[in-house]
Image (tube, rainbow, N blue to C red):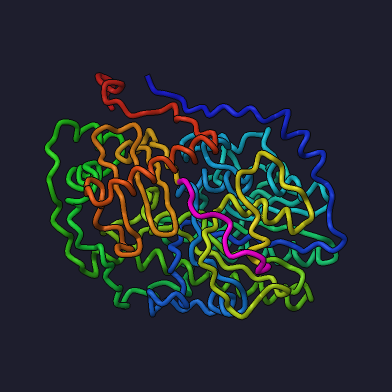
Amino acid sequence: MRHSRLFLISFCLSSVGTVIQATEVKPERPNFIHIMVDDMAADAMGFSGRFPFMKTPHMDQMARDGIVFNQFFVTTSLCSPSRASILTGRYGHGTGVPDNSVKSDPDPCLPTYPELLQKAGYVTAHIGKWHMGHGDHPRPGFSHWYGFDGQGVYFDPVMNRNGKQEKVEGYLTDIITDEALAFIRDNKDRSFSLNLWHKAAHGPFLPPPRHQGILDEVEFPKPASWDNDLRNKPSWRRRSRAHGGVHLDIWLASEEKPIPEAIPPRPFTPENVAKYGKHLSTLFAVDESLGRIMAGLKDLGLLDNTVVIFTADNGYFLGEYARGDKRLADDASIRVPMILSYPPLNRGGETLEAIGLNIDFAPTILEWAGIKPPDTMQGQSLVALFEGKTDKVRDQFLYEYFQEEYAPGIPTILALRTTRWKYVHHPYDPTADDELFDLETDPNEQFSLHGNPDYADRLEALKGAMEQEMKRLEYKRPAYHYDPANYQDKGE
């Protein structure tokens, strides 16, 4: 019998009271544009320097003018839970959207920052990818809706405009950018908040015709961990590599099969890295979109009073450990790009090294709008950081990923990351070794110090800190846990 994953939340009464109180606003309020890419490595931009062939002039210009977060992370590196966390300012275990399998919107008892902005008089819009719950219908908190169902498609999508479906010819990134610019023009004399959430750079990695083949001949740099043979990694990572993957049927078939002590590295060939180039090629249209949005704001005289955020819902492996995808606790997976433009605060390309999280977006936006964040939000406002009044808002954070039934080869993962250390724990898989990394000496997380007696005290301190964070965040154990006995004689 399959388990349903229900994360019960009991904030209805308290949050309703908070919503009613959260209507005080400042006389002059900035506009907000939250631009989010799907699946983007934190260094997949030209100015980052990792990929010399990535020509992203508009991202680079935003970085030169604005503020760049060098240490910005998600609390769950997966589409649906990250989006729910961004809207509610809460960890995935407390939003009702702990993973992609639940197919639900955030718990309706939890106020989202668009709902609070709307109550305070903002015109709010969601344009692009939603990827929570079923259907493309409008969600609460948005004055204007232009979305699509699920992952959507890159070409000729069916869009839902405020409850009415329409098939639109063209390339999705361009289509939603056109819609965003129209919304901005229509509301230039009002306070507005716009979420422009892209499908790119999610698979199947289809750029528009103007960018087809643009990276076919480039020399892709070899990641430092490409040749790592995983002997220092938990056994589930070697098992998935040796026996074909992490999905349910494959994982069931690999039960009782031997797990190698090490995995021979894959050849670093153009054929083996082509998929990373295809992934990156979808970002050129995103860069063009950003340029159009910034130019539109300038032409309308709105640039100086608009907070523009550019980020991603999660990071992405681009060849680290010869991987793609996300989910894991590695920095390649949990670290995301984050650039902020707000001319009153721009300081000519300042780079911040403080730790920021996706759950911080909601309280930050609300504070700038003069709205008191509700008690249900677990993130922290970054306004004081942006204004130069402090140099940090936290020293550490908890990361969580919950095992999904369709891909049980990745177990539930908890991690505590500080500015220097990372402790990775697999709470419900007794076969998976914990990991400990010194990110100062091992930034690619290749050599776990777990089991090294010289770091026993450090390990115990991080374990204790993780337990305290779990308690503070009211961590809930997920209902689903893979057990092969549940699938016997079911033809799966």
Q: Is residue 167 left or right of residue 121?
A: left
Q: Residue at x 68, y 68 (%)?
A: 387
Q: Is residue 342 above or below residue 467?
A: below
Residue 390: in magenta span = yes
Picture residue at 30% right of the left edge, 62% below the top: 442
Asked whether 114 or 248 is in front, the reply is 114
Front position in the image: 459 or 15: 459
What is the quadrant of residue 403 in the picture? top left
Tell me where the magenta segment starts and ends, as one range: 387-398
Q: Nearer the viewer, residue 457 or 86?
A: 457
Quick one: quadrant of the C terminus?
top left
Query: What residue is shown at x 38% (from left), y 45% (from top)?
Result: 461
Quarter of the image with the N terminus is: top left
| x then y, percent, for residue 85 | 57, 45
Give the quarter of the image for residue 205. bottom left
Residue 356 shown left or right of residue 113 in the figure: left
- Is 87 left or right of 395, judged from the image as shown? right
| In the displayed structure image, the side of residue 432 where residue 53 appears, left or right | right
- Residue 119, visible in the rendered structure: yes
Secondary structure predominantly adopted by residues drawn in magenta? loop
